[in-house]
């Protein structure tokens, strides 16, 4: 399926950006991949996107965190798009 332009979504992303939310937080709130938010930000809002690494695929029920390199269960990640485990994300924001 071809990606369609979503003016409502872009408007929501814009207002969240203006509220000083990070692109990662916006992605979580809207249940989108961070790369999708970055795409909309770059394409439709002309803002330089934050860099995100793609999440590793789940193998044997576990996913490798791109930050600490540990293999963890999906529950250790904020959502299925997060490349870093919640512990790494928490460590970063503190
Ligand atoms: Zn980690």
Image: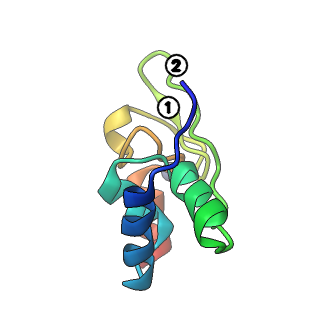
The residue indicated by pointer 1 is 63
- The vertical placement of 87 against 15, above or below, is above
Is the CB of the residue bearing disc 1 within 8 angstroms of ligand 1? no
Rendered location of residue 12, percent (x, y): 36, 66
Q: Which mark is residue 31?
A: none
Rendered location of residue 10, percent (x, y): 45, 62
Secondary structure under tag 1 reads strand
| Residue at 45% across, 51% down | 6
Q: Given the current orientation, which residue lies at the most extreme top position?
A: 60
Work out which quarter of the rendered image holds the C terminus and state it: bottom left
Near-viewer residue (29 or 53): 29
Circles 1 and 2, Cβ within 8 Å, touching? The answer is yes
Question: Quick check: 60 left or right of 16?
Answer: right
Near-viewer residue (89 or 42): 42
- The vertical placement of 45 against 72, above or below, is below
Please tell me how crowded label 1 is: few (under 14), some (14-19), or many (20+) other residues with Cα within 10 Å.
Answer: many
| Residue at 52% across, 41% down | 4
The residue indicated by pointer 2 is 59
Question: Quick check: 66 left or right of 22?
Answer: right
């Amino acid at each position: 399926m071809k990606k369609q332009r979503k003016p409502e979504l872009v408007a929501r992303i814009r207002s969240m950006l203006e509220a000083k939310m990070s692109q990662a937080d916006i992605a979580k709130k809207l249940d989108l991949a961070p790369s999708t938010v970055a795409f909309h930000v770059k394409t439709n809002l002309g803002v330089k996107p934050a860099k995100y690494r793609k999440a590793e695929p789940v193998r044997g029920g576990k996913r490798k965190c791109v930050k600490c390199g540990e293999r963890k269960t999906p529950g250790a990640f904020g959502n299925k798009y997060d490349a870093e485990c919640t512990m790494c994300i928490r460590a970063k924001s503190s």
